[in-house]
C-alpha cells in the first residue's frame, strides 16, 4: 500500500507526511490512555500489544524509512485489526445480530469436537492411503500398460505414487471434488474390485464423518441459542422484579389511610398513573389480571388486601411459568383454607347449640316430667336370688309406682 519504487518524489513525500500524521495520532492516543489508565493500562494484554505496535510503526517511520530500509516492520501495524475481535462481544447486545452471534458461538464451541473428528479423519486417510498406494500406485503391471477408458494414459503415479499423494487424493474423493471421472473411473476400469473399497470409504467419510461435523456444528449452535434465550429470560426476569419493587413503592404511597392495606378503589386510582401502568406492562400483567389477583387474595371478602401480600403474589407470578403455577396453587389453597376455617367455625357453633339443646332436654326430663308424673326416669332394683320368686318388696314397689301413675 502506498507509492511504488518508481513513484515521483512528490507522491512519496505526501505518503510520508500521511504516515507521520498517523504515527502522531497513534502516539497521542497511547499517551492519553497511559495517563488515564496509569498502572492498570499495562495489566491489559491488548493495551501492551497496542503499545508495541505503535512503537514499531514510529520506529519504522522515523528511523528505518529515512535510512532507506523502511517498510520492513510496517506490516505489523495490521495486527491492530485483531482488536476488532473484541467487537464480537458487542454484537450480542443488538437483536439484529443475534443470528450472527449464534453462528459464531456455535463454531467456537464446536472447535474441540471438530479437532477430534479431524484426528479420526486423518487416521482413516492415512490407513486407506497405505492400501491405495500398495494396490494402485505400485501396480505398474496393471495401470502402466496402456490408455485408460477415455483413450488416454492415466497418471496414476501422480495420484497414488506415495502415501502423502494418496492421502491428498483420498481427501479429494472424500470432498466429492471431481472424484468420479478423474480418479475412480480409471481405478474401476483397471481394478473393478477397488470400486467396493471406494464405496466403503465414501460411506465412512463423506456420508459419515462429514455429517458428524455438520451435526456437531448444528448441535452447538442450538445449544448457544438455548443459552442466549435463557440469558434473555433472566434479564427479563430481573426487569420484572425491579418493576415489582417499583410498584410496591407506588402502592405504599397510594395507601392514603396508612394501614398497610390497599382497596380495589385505591388500586384503580393508582392505575390511572402512567408509572403504575408502565410497571404492570413490564410485569406482563393487564389490569384485569391484577383485579383477579386481588380477588383471589381477598379471602375474607373485605375489599382490602395487604400491600406486602399483593406485591409478594406479583413477584411470584412474574418469576416464571412454574413459579406462576405454584403461586396460583398457593392462592387457591389459601382461599380453600379460609373456607374450611369458616366451616369449622360453623360446625363449632352447631355443636354448641346441640350441647345447649341436650342440656335443656335433660333439665326438662328431670324437672318438668318429675313434677307432673312423680317419675324421675330412674328405677332401683334390689338384688335377689336366682331361684327365688318375685320378692314382696319388688311387688310392692311396682304396685306403688302403678298407683302413683294413676
Image: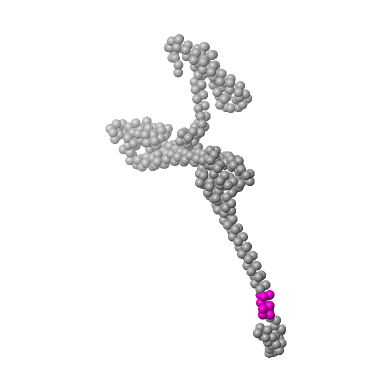
Q: Main secondary structure of the magenta part?
A: helix
Residue situated furthest front in the rendering:
372
Quadrant in the picture for residue 137: top left
Q: Position of residue 164 (x, y in %)?
A: 42, 32
Horizontal placement of 377 versus 55: left or right? Answer: right
Q: Quadrant of the N terminus?
A: top left
> Can you see residue 103?
no
Q: Which residues are magenta?
A: 365-376
Q: Position of residue 214 (x, y in %)?
A: 43, 39
In the image, 151 versus 308, the foreground residue is 308
Whether 113 is drawn above or below 313: the answer is above
Q: Position of residue 404 (x, y in %)?
A: 68, 84
Instruction: Name the residue: 40% across, 41% down.
Output: 207
Instruction: Name the residue: 50% across, 16% down.
Output: 19
Q: Position of residue 215 (x, y in %)?
A: 44, 41
Instruction: Name the residue: 51% across, 42% down.
Output: 284
Residue 203 within the segment the image draws in magenta:
no
Amino acid at each position: 500500500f502506498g507509492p511504488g519504487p518508481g513513484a515521483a518524489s512528490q507522491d512519496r513525500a505526501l505518503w510520508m507526511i500521511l504516515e507521520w500524521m498517523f504515527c502522531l495520532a497513534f502516539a497521542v492516543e497511547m499517551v492519553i490512555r497511559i495517563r488515564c489508565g496509569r498502572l492498570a493500562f499495562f495489566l491489559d494484554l491488548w493495551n501492551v500489544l497496542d503499545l508495541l505496535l505503535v512503537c514499531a510503526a514510529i520506529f519504522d517511520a522515523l528511523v528505518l524509512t529515512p535510512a532507506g530500509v523502511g517498510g520492513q516492520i510496517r506490516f505489523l501495524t495490521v495486527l491492530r485489526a485483531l482488536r476488532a475481535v473484541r467487537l464480537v462481544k458487542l454484537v450480542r447486545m443488538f437483536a439484529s445480530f443475534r443470528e450472527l452471534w449464534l453462528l459464531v458461538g456455535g463454531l467456537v464451541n464446536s472447535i474441540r469436537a471438530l479437532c477430534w473428528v479431524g484426528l479420526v479423519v486423518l487416521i482413516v486417510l492415512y490407513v486407506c492411503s497405505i492400501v491405495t498406494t500398495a494396490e494402485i500406485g505400485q501396480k505398474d503391471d496393471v495401470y502402466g500398460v496402456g490408455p485408460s477408458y477415455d483413450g488416454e494414459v492415466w497418471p496414476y503415479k501422480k495420484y497414488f505414487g506415495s502415501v502423502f499423494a494418496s492421502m491428498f487424493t483420498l481427501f479429494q474423493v472424500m470432498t466429492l471434488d471431481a472424484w468420479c471421472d478423474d480418479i475412480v473411473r480409471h481405478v474401476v476400469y483397471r481394478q473393478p474390485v477397488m470400486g467396493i473399497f471406494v464405496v466403503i470409504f465414501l460411506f465412512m467419510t463423506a456420508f459419515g464423518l462429514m455429517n458428524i461435523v455438520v451435526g456437531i456444528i448444528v448441535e452447538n449452535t442450538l445449544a448457544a441459542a438455548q443459552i442466549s434465550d435463557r440469558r434473555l429470560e433472566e434479564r427479563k426476569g430481573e426487569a420484572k422484579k425491579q418493576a415489582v419493587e417499583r410498584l410496591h413503592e407506588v402502592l405504599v404511597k397510594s395507601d392514603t389511610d396508612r394501614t398497610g392495606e390497599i382497596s380495589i378503589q385505591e388500586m384503580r386510582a393508582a392505575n390511572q398513573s402512567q408509572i403504575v401502568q408502565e410497571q404492570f406492562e413490564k410485569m406482563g400483567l393487564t389490569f384485569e389480571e391484577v383485579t383477579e389477583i386481588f380477588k383471589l387474595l381477598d379471602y375474607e371478602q373485605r375489599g382490602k388486601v395487604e400491600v406486602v401480600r399483593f406485591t409478594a403474589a406479583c413477584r411470584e407470578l412474574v418469576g416464571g411459568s412454574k413459579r406462576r403455577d405454584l403461586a396460583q396453587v398457593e392462592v387457591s389453597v389459601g382461599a380453600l383454607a379460609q373456607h374450611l376455617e369458616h366451616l369449622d367455625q360453623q360446625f363449632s357453633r352447631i355443636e354448641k347449640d346441640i350441647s345447649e339443646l341436650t342440656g335443656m332436654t335433660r333439665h326438662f326430663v328431670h324437672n318438668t316430667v318429675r313434677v307432673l308424673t312423680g317419675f324421675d326416669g330412674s328405677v332401683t332394683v334390689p338384688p335377689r336370688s336366682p331361684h327365688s320368686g318375685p320378692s314382696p318388696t319388688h311387688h310392692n314397689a311396682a304396685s306403688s309406682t302403678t298407683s302413683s301413675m294413676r
